[in-house]
Amino acid sequence: MFHYLGPAFAVLLFARVDALGVAWLRIASAAVVFAVWRRPWRVWARLERPVRWVLAGWAAVLAVMNSAFYLALERLPLGTVAAIEFLPVIVLAAWASRTRRNAVALVCAVAGVYLLVDVRLGGEPLGFVFAAANAGLFAAYIVLGHRVARDPAVSGLDGLALSMMIAAVVAVPFGIADAAPAFTDAVALAAAVGVGVTSSVIPYVSDQLAMARLPRATYALMVSLLPATATVIGVVVLTQVPSAAEVAGVILVIVGVAVHREREASSEPAPPPGERVTPEHG
């Protein structure tokens, strides 16, 4: 629920703070929470340079991805952006494991995204540019996140905390000016902190805890519900009622996410609690 409940609150905040400002406030507030909780700089001191570069790259992707995400949300319904976001996940799985199952998943997902794009492309072409950028960066986020998770020098939560802190710095040049009004508006600042906690702390930590206890196939099946949750939240919180074609598009994406399987996912045992893991989605 929180993966898209937080962004729905962010859309409501756009009336007080511009999208790039909300994106920076989200990252910065989450970085503060992780800093107080994990104190990840203690880990940074003992990391080798290649690991630091991967964390820095992950952070840069995180900063730009969140900014593109909110710029897309300014122009498109939450459910549409969420559905487009999952297309690279299926493409990556189909590329890594070229099976009939993943081919079916890819066809469903592409058909679903096509329906969504066909419905709204005429009115909001720039929104799809930002949504596509967010989707591509989402794929890069997954790849870099798995590299961090597999490194014995840093745990999943500490790597996430470090990357969030670096991302807050990376996003300063294109977010701080738009975020400035919130520093003189107590309501907007409190709401922005709430967006950070509900968007970047609760769901990302929940990912870590769930993936440490569930087989990957089970986790992937549950992830397939996210475009549906985003659509429902868009209706309830933002009154973004989808058309029949948009509902069909979201359903096709859900089917694609549910059907797809990553390489060796079917035989992979569930990792024990506490093992280093990383979010599969952002």
Image (cartoon, helix red, strand yellow):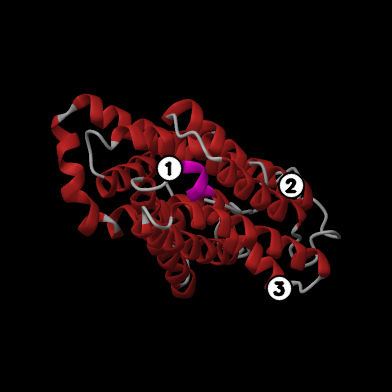
The residue indicated by pointer 3 is: 96
Query: Is the residue 1 above or below the residue 139 in the image?
Result: above
| Secondary structure that dominates the magenta span | helix
Depth order, front residue of 131/122: 122
Asked if labels 1 and 3 touch by Cβ distance under 8 angstroms, the answer is no
Describe residue 26's horizontal placement relative to residue 250 as left or right. left
> Which quadrant: the N terminus?
top right
Tell which circle, 1 or 2, labels the residue nearer the N-terminal end.
Answer: 1
Identify the secondary structure beneath mark 3.
helix
Identify the secondary structure beneath mark 2.
helix
Camera-nearest label, 3 or 1: 3
Camera-nearest label, 1 or 2: 2
From mark 1 to mark 2, how far is it between C-alphas?
A: 28 Å
Label 2: how many Cα within 10 Å (few below 14, some 14–19, many 20+): some
Tell which circle, 3 or 2, labels the residue nearer the N-terminal end.
Answer: 3
Describe residue 93's horizontal placement relative to residue 33 as left or right. right
| x and y percentages locating residue 228 in the rendered image | 61, 39
- Identity of the residue drawn at 52% across and 38% down: 242
Depth order, front residue of 138/248: 248
| x and y percentages locating residue 132 in the rendered image | 45, 62
The residue indicated by pointer 1 is: 34
Label 1: how many Cα within 10 Å (few below 14, some 14–19, many 20+): many
Amino acid type indicated by mark 3 = Ala
Amino acid type indicated by mark 2 = Leu
Q: Can you name the residue that lies furthest to the right here? A: 267
Q: Which residues are magenta?
A: 78-82
The residue indicated by pointer 2 is: 221
User: In the image, is residue 80 part of the stretch drawn in magenta?
Assistant: yes
